[in-house]
Image (cartoon, rainbow, N blue to C red):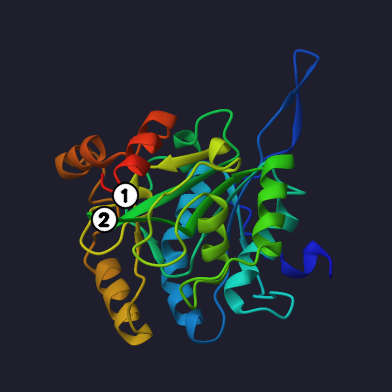
Amino acid sequence: MESIEDHRHIYNYVRVGTRGEMGGTKVHRVTKVLVTVGTGPMLPVLDLALRTFRPYAERHGYDLVIGSGDANGREPAWAKVVLLRRLLAVYDEALWLDSDILILDGSKDIADSVPAGHFQGLVEQAVSEKEHGINTGVWFLRAGPASTGFLDAVWDHDATGEPGMWENLQALDLLGYTTVRPYRPIRQTEWLTGTALLDPTWNAIGGIPGRFRHYSAMSNAYRRRVMGRDLASGRIERLVRSAELAAYERTRHRRNTDRYFDRRIAGDGEP
């Protein structure tokens, strides 16, 4: 496996040393990286996404790394696992964003929404009243044995289910969700304990108001048109402090507690 430098194209908006001196005491500064990949037909999509990724990285102190798309011979979607695994050996925190995402509201750092003691943060997307599935298009990880172990488990796991879901399917199974639609949580797992389920606005789909808007499940031509429209229309930052977003966060926030999952499992996936 080649060096991490082969995949590292960093926009150094904020130069943060890993250690500094303060009153003679060493103080560790958290180093963060925003990671993405866009190759082939997704290159024009990534160009649109980077218009929002770059200012977000600068605003919150992330390096920006654009991977080559190397997935060690697997389908391109697996490149995120390869790259995150390498970067977490260098950085304290990593935020993966799929290339078909726009950051509509960059006022908050997603890292602040992942409670201490959790090694990763993911969004459980509510596709319908009976379908709630984890989506790895937005994936926050903190360096350590737990995140390394989970990435390795995703890579090595061999669950079967919906076609074309690749690494997302393995993550679903490892976190105790069904691997065929409708996705829903059916059991507790060791990995779920350290996973924070983030507010859906961090990975919003369809007409849901969101901080990070995910333009998934559409043709590439239509995706580029809609993303370009949203960029041109000045929607970026429009949702900051909006009453609609605040109300959505209050009513749809997924609580990461055993009681919540016990109730969901007992109710066969009903919210």
Crowding near pointer 1: few (<14 within 10 Å), some, many (20+)? some
Q: Which residue is mark 2?
A: 130
**Residue that label 1 marks:** 269
Element assignment for label 1: loop
Q: Residue at the spot x=54%, y=41% of the render?
A: 192
Q: Position of residue 187 (x, y in %)?
A: 48, 45
Could you tell whether 133 is left or right of 61 in the image? left
- Against 216, residue 198 (above or below) is above
Quadrant of the image occupied by residue 20: top right
Asked whether residue 144 appears in the rendered view, the answer is: no
Res 9 label: none
Taking depth in this image into account, of 51 and 115 the one nearest to the observer is 115
The amino acid on which the numbered mark 2 sits, given as a three-letter code, is: Lys
Pick the quarter of the image with the C terminus. Answer: top left
The kind of residue on which mark 1 rests is Gly
- Identify the residue at horizontal 72%, vertical 48% (top origin): 149
Q: How many marks?
A: 2
Say whether residue 173 is left or right of residue 24: left
Q: Residue at x 63, y 53 (%)?
A: 12
Which of the image's four quarters has the N terminus? bottom right
**Badge 2: few (under 14), some or many (20 or more) residues near its Cα, within 10 Å?**
some
The tag earlier along the polypeptide, 1 or 2, is 2
Residue at figure coordinates x 51%, y 41% from the top left: 188
